[in-house]
Image (cartoon, rainbow, N blue to C red):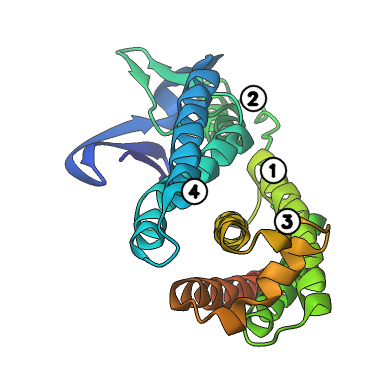
Amino acid sequence: MSSLWLGTDHLLYIKGSGLFVPFREEYRRFRYQDIQSIATVRTAGMWGYGALLLLGLVIFGLTTFAILAGRDPDSNFGLIWTLALPLPLGLICLIMLVRNFVLGPRCVCELQTALKKERIGPLSRIYKAKQVLDVLEGRIQEQQASVKLDAENSPPATVSGPLPQIVPKTAMFGFIVSLVAGLLLVAAVHMENVVLVGALFTTILAAILLVMGGVITSVRKPCPEGVRGSLWVLLGTLFSVSGTALVYYSVVALDVPSFTISAAGPFEAFASLPSTGNLAFYLIFVIAGGVMAIAGLIGLIIASRFKKHSTENS
């Protein structure tokens, strides 16, 4: 609900409160010349929040499989109920749990001037706070060095700036592999081919590892917002596809136990999707495949343009 904005000679802190959207906002300005210190203190909030999300994941996961195990095979009510409530809530808990640990340790950040001390709400994670403070340090040194120059007629101090933005190497490969995985997913739900499904599972696993590596790097180091946003969308989509595929396999395995006998059972179960006529799973996988392919393509375009622009400027 709150945000920070860089002005030419001041920092604007918009302090908001509300639910989903800010209902109330306060505008506070801090001149770079007046800032005496910015202190960050690491807290243990990441672990407590992570424990709550893990508990939610376990509860919704067990609820999902309990409903599937007790459902009537001749009725779709249990399946619809699972896809509508416990499965999405479980996936949200999983994605938020991963996001919580990817963003890193929580912290408290306070800005001190001669008149007051202000806690900066948006800077609640160590890695994000470090990147913002790297930018602020340059602005503050520049403004305060000019004041010192006017007062003492001495040479200005050396001003350190923020680290340059980079595109993680794993992100580029992650975009390409995710694009291929999205196309394979759309193809797999239309063709009963075990080899194609095997290639799809391998590609999705590789995409998860690459995208996860890209997300971690983009959080810990300066990265273009478009690239970081595409990585988060891809990671959420990949987890959603994996969770939905696990539920689909559970449904098919409960109805046809022969799919649980051999190691190729999951591949055969997924390959049978076109013949089962299950419209709900078909739509979910087709939409997810399209989102995955589009997000991978957009991320690849944004990353390529950024690298090209950086090369031209250098």
- Residue that mark 2 sits on: 154
Q: Is residue 305 left or right of residue 298?
A: right
- Identified at 58% across, 27% down, the residue is 126
The amino acid type found where label 3 is placed reads Thr
- Residue that mark 4 sits on: 69
Q: Position of residue 203 (x, y in %)?
A: 78, 66
Query: Looking at the image, is mark 3 or mark 4 earlier in the sequence?
Result: 4
Q: Mark 1 touching mark 2, by CB under 8 A?
A: no
Crowding near the residue tagged with mark 3, few <14, some 14–19, many ≥20 C-alpha atoms within 10 Å: some
Q: Is residue 279 above or below residue 157?
A: below
Q: Quadrant of residue 280?
A: bottom left
Badge nearest the viewer, 2 or 4: 4
Q: Quadrant of residue 136?
A: top right
Cα separation between marks 3 and 2: 78 Å
Cα separation between marks 3 and 1: 35 Å
- Residue that mark 3 sits on: 260
The amino acid type found where label 1 is placed reads Ile
Element carrying mark 2: loop
Badge nearest the viewer, 1 or 2: 1
Query: Looking at the image, is mark 3 or mark 2 earlier in the sequence?
Result: 2
- Identified at 44% across, 27% down, the residue is 33
The amino acid type found where label 2 is placed reads Ser
Q: Is residue 24 left or right of residue 84?
A: left
Q: Which mark is residue 216?
A: 1
